[in-house]
Image (cartoon, helix red, strand yellow):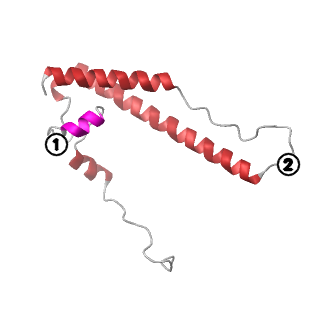
Amino acid sequence: MDPAARQRHRQRLLALRVEILAEGDIEPEAARQDPTSVGNDEDTQALAEMSQSIASSRNRNRTEVLARVTAALARLDDDPESYGLCAECEEPIAGKRLELMPYVELCVECQGAHDGPRNKGGRRHLRDFR
């Protein structure tokens, strides 16, 4: 990878880091709006729990991406020649994949092997519940 491309990826990674940090954590909704109320609406409770779960998942995913961005910036600083190469097979990571996710460490093939086979799953017929 040429130095101009590495610099472009560095700028993209820095912009991603700033964007993630600027957004901050998503505050989950409180399960109860009024803690003194005795009765509760079951639909409201389920919706609040779902909102909390979504907020928690988004925060966890953002933290994970931030860690990967930081690691990619460290790779660029420590060993710029290895940036853009797959951590397992040491082949160049496809340009489109690296453009979309400049923090990736694995090529498509190695990522697929790491993730394992996709579960086609699902039922084919309504009676396939057994």
Q: Position of residue 125 (x, y in %)?
A: 45, 77
Residue 107 sits above or below residue 3 on the image: below
Q: Position of residue 120 (x, y in %)?
A: 36, 65
Q: Which label sits on residue 39?
A: 2
Say which residue label 1 marks: 89
Decide: few, some or many residues near mark 1? Use Cα within 10 Å; few <14, some 14-19, many ≥20.
Answer: few
Q: Is residue 120 left or right of residue 7?
A: right
Q: CA distance from mark 1 to mark 2?
A: 59 Å
Question: Helix, strand or loop at disc 2?
Answer: loop
Q: Residue at x 81, y 37 (%)?
A: 34
Residue 70 sits above or below residue 99 on the image: above
Q: Residue at x 20, y 32 (%)?
A: 84
Q: Is residue 86 visible?
A: no
The three-letter amino acid code for the residue at tag 1 is Cys
Of the image marks 1 and 2, the number of the one nearer the N terminus: 2
Q: Nearer the viewer, mark 1 or mark 2?
A: 2
Q: Which residues are magenta?
A: 95-101
